[in-house]
Image: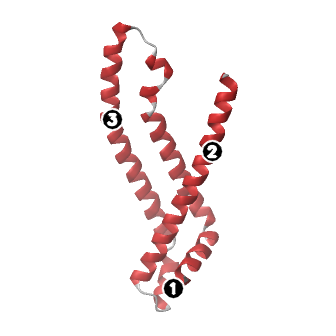
Amino acid sequence: MMLFKLSLKNMKKSLKDYTIYFLTLVLGVAIFYIFNSLDSQEAMLQVSQSTKSIIKLLIELLGMVSVFVAVILGLLIVYANNFLINRRKKEFGIYMTLGMGRRQISKIIIIETVMVGIISLIIRTCWWCVCITIYVYINC
């Protein structure tokens, strides 16, 4: 419980740094979603018979490129996480000086990462609900 409180306090203190990480997560998932939803767009479904074979080939190609995009986004998230850890090296050094072990510091980092992930998931879901509502309202 003490590590959870410490993680929460650290997140509040490092809000500016976590904003960068949060935006990376939100934009990364949004780009991945947009890229993967191209094949289910209404314009793609309402094409003539002659272009359907070309569209099917493009969809297969998008599936292969989707794996590449996922790897790039994964590396981007790892880079952002390493960026945060490097900015907080002094803080972790102080914790180690005060007697905290590497395992406890790792737990703090994991708790903070999971909490930021959950918060970004909640905000991202609410944002998409708002966007979809606006889209439906405009088009209907």
Q: Name the residue located 54 percent from the left edge and 49 percent from the top edge.
A: 26
Q: Name the residue located 36 percent from the left edge and 38 percent from the top edge.
A: 66
Q: What amino acid is found at the position of numbered circle 2 in the picture?
A: Trp
Measured from the top left, where is residue 60 in percent x and y? Answer: 30, 28
Q: Which mark is residue 65?
A: 3
Eyeballing the image, is 71 above or below 46?
below
Measured from the top left, where is residue 114 in percent x and y? Answer: 49, 64
* Distance between the alpha carbons at the discs numbered 1 and 3: 44 Å
* Distance between the alpha carbons at the discs numbered 1 and 2: 38 Å
Circles 1 and 2: CB distance less than 8 Å? no
- Disc 1 crowd, CA 10 A, few/some/many (<14, 14-19, 20+): few
Q: Which type of secondary structure does the marked residue at label 1 adopt?
A: helix
Q: Which type of secondary structure does the marked residue at label 2 adopt?
A: helix
- Disc 3 crowd, CA 10 A, few/some/many (<14, 14-19, 20+): some
Report which quarter residue 63 is drawn in.
Answer: top left
Q: Earlier in the sequence, mark 1 or mark 2?
A: 1
Residue denoted by label 1: 94
